[in-house]
Image: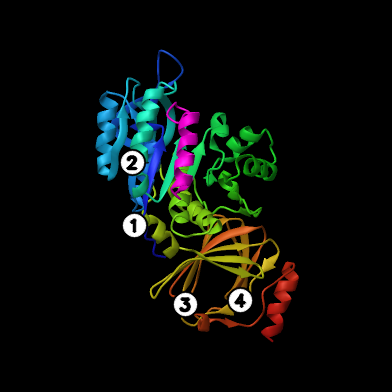
Amino acid sequence: MKLDFSDKRVLVVGDIMLDKHIHGTISRLSPEAPVPILKAEKETFNPGGAANLAANLSSLGAKVYLAGIVGEDEAQKILFKELEKNNIDFSCILHTKKPTIQKIRGLARQNKLYHQHMLRIDYEDTSQISKEIEEKLFLLISAKINEVDAIALCDYAKGTLTESLVKSLISLAKQNGKLLTADCKPINIDFYKNVDLLKPNKKEAIEMTLNENIEEAGKILREKLNSNIVITKGGEGMSIFEKNNNIAHFPTNVKEVYDVAGAGDTVLAVLTLSLCSGFNLTQAVQLADRAAGIVISKPGVTVITKQDLEKSFNNEIKIVPKEWGEEQWIVNNEKYCGKKMHIKQGYYCSYHMHKIKEETFYVLEGELEVVHNGGYLQVETGETLHIKPGSYHSFRALKDTIFFEFSTHHLNEDNYRLTKSSSGNHEKWKKEIEEVLK
């Protein structure tokens, strides 16, 4: 799938931060207190908060303007260098007496990856910006409004997005026909009436509405704000509550989680670009879920790239339902084939062989009994079985079992079945095979 957001321009307004990561190893506890000692090996820096949202948008190909405040300090200098690297325009950022917000994370190395999050230190002043700074910021944003397709508000309740500024920005967007999306902390929810889209996570939606039923929470937010609502629910997927009263729930494609830091910014970035590119909300949510699955599978705060998102469609795993369970086709090319198989207890596959394909089975979890070369044998967790071309075989699950098949190229026409897949005990399975061999 080809994605092109290069003609889109987005203005991000919100709480700008610098993320610092200290990477190292842990081998002992401190003699001063029962805490681990992180031996620092290197430091890395990334745009954080609203700047991370901007970095995600830029990485997806959009032209991005960032508006907010920073301090006159070393963190600001490092942050601006990172913004330059990410091709983010920071001409709408004001310098103030408040320090640049900085979040420092300690990450311990495990299995050659820096992904064990050990601690976090925050440097911040969360007091609201002054009226003077607010007015200056609004003037800078107003001057850019005709250059952008959308405004995205990123509110971590750190003092940049005051109630009057948010309401002024919503009015500005409406007057100029610009899409306005937002992500905010529950304490500021009342600021966001009439935004085009609000994206809280499940915990925030419950806190915003005092209702633990997500469907009810979504409806309450939709009516209260007169907005489209997307609630992210982690491993449970996402739910949408549209102003036209449509409600839909989407399961997630997320397979593996290393670090969820920054994932909300990735979701809002993809939603914003998708909606101002003509996607409907369902399509936008499905694309955003795919993007979130990519970034949380990597350690630390990372951004989604256009290339990674496009590649994820090319790497789609084909799932083939079977009488006995399912096959997940990981790869099948001219040289080799790889499948992940799920077989339910008591089910068995057809008695079959391949004239060309050579196979090796590896049991990841569970236990199989296999008829092969005229005999019956059991293959347990961690064991393998090699099947040569021309050898009839069938496997039956003694437990719910996950196993892998590694083989040469799979061709549908290279299947020669003597029985059908079914379920039953050992004697039924054995009898069916013996009947066709008479």
Marks 1 and 4: in contact by CB < 8 Å? no
Numbered disc in front, either 1 or 2: 2
Residue at left offset 41%, top offset 32%: 15
Q: Residues within 10 Å of mark 2 (few under 14, many from 20)?
A: few
- Kindly identify which numbered label has been placed on residue 374: 4
Measured in 3D between alpha carbons, the distance from the residue under mark 4 to the one under mark 1, in whole angstroms, is: 65 Å
Q: What kind of residue is marked 3?
A: Lys
Q: Quick check: 197 above or below 408?
A: above
Q: Earlier in the sequence, mark 2 or mark 4?
A: 2
Q: Dot 1 corresponds to which residue?
A: 7
The N terminus sits in image quarter: bottom left
Q: What kind of residue is marked 2?
A: Ala
Range covered by the magenta-colored residues: 157-180
- Residue 367: give x, y in percent of width and height: 62, 58
Q: Dot 3 corresponds to which residue?
A: 357
Q: Dot 2 corresponds to which residue?
A: 143
Numbered disc in front, either 4 or 3: 3
> In terms of secondary structure, where does tag 2 sit?
helix
Of 25 and 367, the residue lying toward us = 25
Q: Earlier in the sequence, mark 4 or mark 1?
A: 1
